[in-house]
Amino acid sequence: MKAPVPMHIPDGFLSLAVALVLWLVSIAFIGLALKRAGKELPEERLPLVGVLAAAIFAGQMLNFSVAGGTSGHLLGSALAVMLLGPWTAALVMACVVSVQALIFQDGGVIALGANLFNMAIVGVAVAYFAASLCRRLFGKRKGLPFVSAFAAGWLSIFIASLAAALELAVSGTSPAAIAVPAMAGIHALIGIGEGLITFGAVSLIMASFPQLLDSEAHKKSKASLVATAGLVFTLALLVLSPLASSKPDGLEWVAEKLGFLQLAQDPFFNIIPDYVMPGVHNEAVATILAGVIGCAIVIALAWLIVKRKQGEASKS
């Protein structure tokens, strides 16, 4: 069994100018999300915020194999949008991506702005607009949540990968004519996995807690039950995390094929690198322990941020 491989843009792939611009854009957008999230999410759904953040974190540890000798992983932005709305989803994704970079050295610190932009902004925005478009096209038909789930999941991965390819091109790392087709091709396949996972999650929610997919249904009595079920599911993902595919993820595969993998820089510091808890000799146990710590951090961080914004919104 092997620990999951790092997945996000490392330092060295992007020019300093591109990384700085994306930092500024991400800070501005997340600041806007902080203002809007408190008004978007009803108080009854607050327990869902931390649990969903943890489930996405754990899900991203579980890489799945894709044809062509590569692997993919859950992004989770589509599911977050469908359950929490776009602004709260952006904050949840920002918490997950930031913890991954700062605690687990998954993605560079300088490149963190780019990873936030691709996953917490582009991924969330695309998922939101895809789900909204499906709602306009299909109205309130019975199969709407399932169509929306797959479409939002696939598009969020595919468009986010194009954003990353353009960032590489503008940085001078790889020409757009090469990077864009390479990233698009492999992530079109990975996006199918994202779509199917989101479809499966929505199917499970529809069978157990269908009111979660209705923004107008606020059933406080089931909040604790939903949170408990979400935590059990998250723990199951963590137990399975040592079984993650050790094949390179889409970006790493492209970087190797196009000859710029050597540009990746080592992290400035190491806390729990590569999702393996230092000092634990059994790699499977070390991976699970690292995941538990990561989930606990994102639960606390996401819950505190959204709870505070809800408090501010209620006073205004």
Image (spheres, helix red, strand yellow):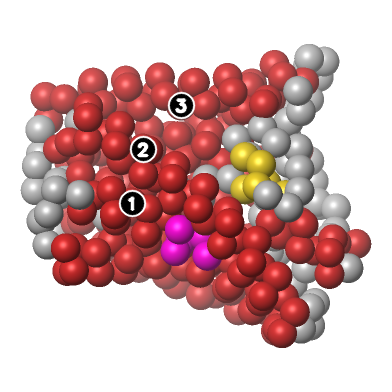
65 in magenta: no
Please provide percent x and percent y for residue 254: 76, 63
* Callout 1 crowding tier (Cα within 10 Å): few <14, some 14–19, many ≥20: many
Please provide percent x and percent y for residue 143: 20, 49
Please, what is the three-letter code of the amino acid marked with disc 2?
Ala
State the separation of the CA atoms marked 2 and 1. 9 Å
Q: Is residue 145 left or right of residue 253?
A: left
Q: Which residue is mark 1?
A: 149
Q: Sequence-wise, which precedes: disc 2 or disc 1?
A: 1
Q: Residue at x 38, y 67 (%)?
A: 125
Q: Quadrant of residue 255?
A: bottom right
* Callout 3 crowding tier (Cα within 10 Å): few <14, some 14–19, many ≥20: many
**Which quarter of the image is occupied by the N terminus?**
top right
Please, what is the three-letter code of the amino acid marked with disc 3?
Thr
Q: Which residue is mark 2?
A: 201
- Chain part drawn in magenta: 154-158
